[in-house]
Image (cartoon, rainbow, N blue to C red):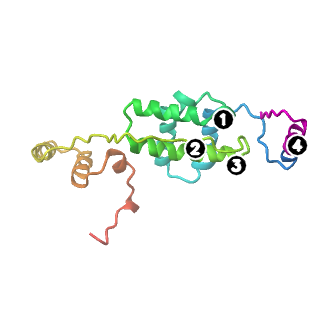
Amino acid sequence: RRSFTSKKKKNVTDWLAKMRNDDNMGLLPKKSNITVKELSKQWLKEVKEPTVTPQVYYHIEKSFEKHLYPVLGDYKIQELDRFAIEKAYKKMFDSNFSDGTIEVFASYFKQLLRYAVDLRIIIEDPHKNVIITKHGKKKKVDAYTDSEQRKLVGYLKDKYEPHNVLFYLLLATGMREGEAAALTWKDIDFSSG
């Protein structure tokens, strides 16, 4: 819904004529009650699922469930504005999420809002002028010391189980669990050594 006020009747008449013209040309958004949560599920299924790996799809889906739905999920897309979005980011910062986590989330959220524009649910992306303030927060990574690594390797040697190979892989490469779990045989280059 759009409104316009003016003290001059001609200005109102001109604006109304422009709105009718824009509507006839299909430039105005369709009336919709779709919520952020509903549209995000549609976007994930129609846009992301066919184009990303299952691991990336799962990551985006969980990111939305954890960060988007609790704060903005029930908002109607057409009622979403810059201030609501900034409030959501502030809540994430206040919950001690790192700048990097918020940047990745923002990237997916912007794609979702561009999808809403493409579907003509909204005219322009409300994220366009959002200011994401960086707080310089980085996740502290607690790595094993050399001594702890030696103890773990000794234990793994003494108590051999087939899944222990995973622990060797993680220790030797520095990979995270999710990265190792996503590996397939085609990711390994046997020719380079």
* CA separation in Å, label 1 and label 4: 28 Å
Distance from disc 1 to disc 2, alpha carbons, whole Å, reads 16 Å
Left or right of 25, for residue 38: left
- The kind of residue tagged 4 is Asp
Q: Return the residue at label 2.
A: 129
Residue pointed to by mark 4: 14
Question: Does the magenta-highlighted stretch encompass residue 11?
Answer: yes
Residues in magenta, as a range = 1-19
**Foreground tag (3 vs 2):** 2
What number is the disc on residue 118?
3
In primary-sequence order, the first of circles 1 and 3 is 1
Most foreground residue, 130 or 28: 130
What is the x, y in percent for residue 65?
A: 51, 33
Quarter-of-image position of residue 124:
top right
- Residue wearing tag 1: 77
The kind of secondary structure element at disc 4 is: helix
Distance CA(mark 1)–CA(mark 3): 13 Å
Q: Give the percent coordinates (x, y) of residue 47.
A: 62, 49
Assess disc 3: are there few (<14), some (14-19) or many (≥20) residues with their C-alpha within 10 Å of its C-alpha. Answer: some
Q: Quadrant of the N terminus?
A: top right
Q: In the displayed image of the protein, which residue is found farthest to the bottom?
A: 191
Cα separation between marks 4 and 3: 27 Å
Q: Is residue 77 above or below residue 183?
A: above
Tell me the kind of residue under disc 2. Asn
Q: Residue 74 in magenta?
A: no
Q: Earlier in the sequence, mark 1 or mark 2?
A: 1
Q: CA distance from mark 3 to mark 2?
A: 18 Å
Query: Please, which residue is most extreme toward the front here?
Result: 7
At 27% from the left and 48% from the top, the residue drawn is: 166
